[in-house]
Image (spheres, helix red, strand yellow):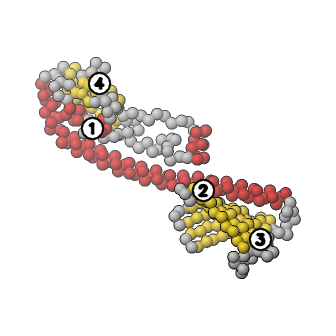
Amino acid sequence: MDFFHRTPLQVRYQQLISEEDQSSSEVFFGLGFTTFEAKMLLTRGLDNFTKFSIGVGHTSWSGLSWIFRLQKADLCLCVPIQISSFASVGYSTILYSFSSAYLGFLSGAIHMVMGELLERTRNAVSSELMREEKMLSVTKTRSDAENQQMLMKRKSSINRRSEESKGGVVIEKATYSAEGGDCLDVTIPLQFWAVDSSLKLPSSSFGSMLGFYDVSGDKMNARGSSTDNGLVSLWKCLFQESSKDEKIPVLFVRYKFNGILFDLYTNDNEALVLPNSSSSRS
């Protein structure tokens, strides 16, 4: 109790709404000998040290107010906008009750929209960081694949000469690519694995093999990404076209067998066997 305040008897209740976005609700009631005060606020964290609150307040000496409050560490700025005073005509009528309800609804709507905007801002920053990490990762992975191909080149050349001498499997051109992603020349790795007039690779992702890497590219910009939520995802579901299926990387091989040139397309995660009856003559 504070006997030097207009309302020495004060009760304050706070309820955490979401720990993730630091949102909470607050109800305050103060009672004096001839005065009283009541406030209801919704609070949302802007960052680890800053909070923004919006709500409705009423005091017996000033009437109905729309309250905006900004707190940063120990500094607090409170801006009450007076809507109706005690002396206003119709103070205790339906109009006053409607004003209170309207301000409460408007405060809740602003609080929700701010939450969406803050969430979208955080997600945009997070997505940009993830894109940068993806680009760095792809650059490193491509460099690793090229270094591996350099080590495979000598053995690949030996295999090629051996296969050419007996009319076996000779890789003329091979690429591993994905629509919207990268395209990697994998002629050296495939010739490296070609022995005894055949080439057999198991049904797994080619991107995990020596001399390869994941060429699928950055899917962060696809519609309906996991970073969208709330009103944003609802809007996309209602008013935007659904996203297309993600493109699967494809391995293209142009090879010779018995002196005849063939072409073959193989989807990622499918087995590759050369020579193959599904091949078409080039």
Which residue bears the numbered disc 1?
209
Picture disc at residue 179: none
Which residue bears the numbered disc 3?
36
Instruction: Determine the secondary structure under disc 2.
Output: strand
Can the viewer see residue 280 in this picture? Answer: no
Q: Is residue 82 left or right of residue 259?
A: right
The tag earlier along the polypeptide, 3 or 1, is 3
Separation of residues labelled 3 and 2 (CA atoms): 27 Å
Can the viewer see residue 49 in this picture? Answer: yes
Instruction: Determine the secondary structure under disc 4.
Output: strand
Dividing the picture into quarters, in which one does residue 211 lie? Answer: top left
Q: Are marks 1 and 2 in contact (CB under 8 Å)?
A: no
**Residue 138, how many percent across, how many down?**
34, 46
Separation of residues labelled 3 and 4 (CA atoms): 86 Å
Separation of residues labelled 1 and 4 (CA atoms): 21 Å
Mark 1 neighbour density, 10 Å: few (under 14) some (14–19) many (20 or more): few
